[in-house]
Amino acid sequence: MFIMQWSDALGKVHGRYAGSPRIVSLVPSLTELLVALDLAEVLVGRTGFCIHPRQVVRRIPKLGGTKGFNVDKLRALKPTHVIVNIDENRREEVEALADFVPHLIVTHPLTVGDNLDLYRLLGGVFARERQAESLCNAFKREWTALNVLADGLPRQHVLYLIWREPWLSVGRDTYISRMLAAAGWDTLPHESPVRYPEVDLSALAGAADIVFLSTEPYPFRKQHLHRLQEQLPGTRCALIDGEMVSWYGSRAIHGLKYLRELRTRLANPS
């Protein structure tokens, strides 16, 4: 008899869940993915940052943030599964859940292609293979289209800013950097001992073809863009939708299309 099993980011093997699941998601992008897999009805808890799709998640109880979530509220929901992420949740808080949560599923997508395994992991555990394969097919179409575009354009160096005072960027071993690389944008700095380094804005901006201000986690807006452009005359600066670049899961499909359209627009300014 063939037993279907899937491994999470820690190598823990998860089989098909035979009962009626009660899922808590502590990762905003994965909450959105679970809804895309037609699992909204069995989502019983989320963080306050799980905001998409808004009309669906508004009925799901909030447990606090991705860090510092309310353990007592979570316990009261009696989840069968809690979905977490290595970057977004604190290890010690997740480990404490093992005392009363039957199944902890740990995720950690680092490459753009990891989304395919993510769809199949959650789709397999919760008997949503058809929905998972539909997402995989949509992802592959957008991935191919972006690659075709990027192959036809010169590669560029970009400085992707996620915070100010101090200025923070992204290292090349992050999911964000690899999403940008898929569009032909190589992030600065070239090397970093940390994944989200503090940067010397003036020094790196001079080496960048474009300086991006991301709309998250710092909420950069047009006024910040205007100030930065005044501070860096002669350097091209642009806003970029942080959700489209940093959210994996089903949002990655939209993110690939968004990057294709943005790369096209910035390559052909009006």
Image (spheres, grey):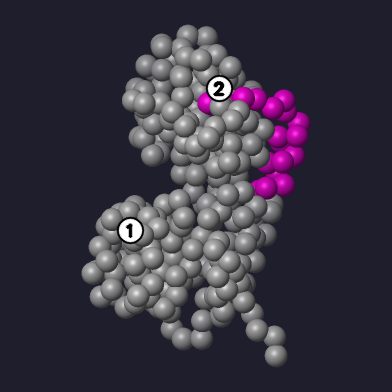
Mark 1 lies on residue: 47
Location of the C terminus (image quadrant): top right
The part of the chain drawn in magenta is 142-159
What amino acid is at disc 2?
Ile
Point out the tag, 2 or 1, that comes first from the N-terminus.
1
Which quarter of the image is occupied by the N terminus? bottom right
Q: Residue at x 55, y 42 (%)?
A: 174
- Residue reaching furthest top? 233
Helix, strand or loop status at disc 2: strand
Give the residue at x 61% y 49%: 111
Task: Count up the numbered dots.
Answer: 2
Badge 2 is on which residue?
Answer: 210
Q: Is residue 92 left or right of residue 260?
A: left
Let me know if residue 54 appears in the view: no
Residue 148 belongs to magenta span = yes
Kindly tell me whether residue 253 is visible in this rendering: yes
| In front of the other: 24 or 237 | 24
Q: Position of residue 19 (x, y in %)?
A: 46, 86
Provide residue 162's location: percent of width, then percent of height: 43, 33
Disc 1 element: loop
Judging depth in this view, the residue of 7 and 57 nearest the camera is: 7
Residue 66 vertical placement versus 210 (above, below): below
Three-letter residue code for mark 1 = Thr
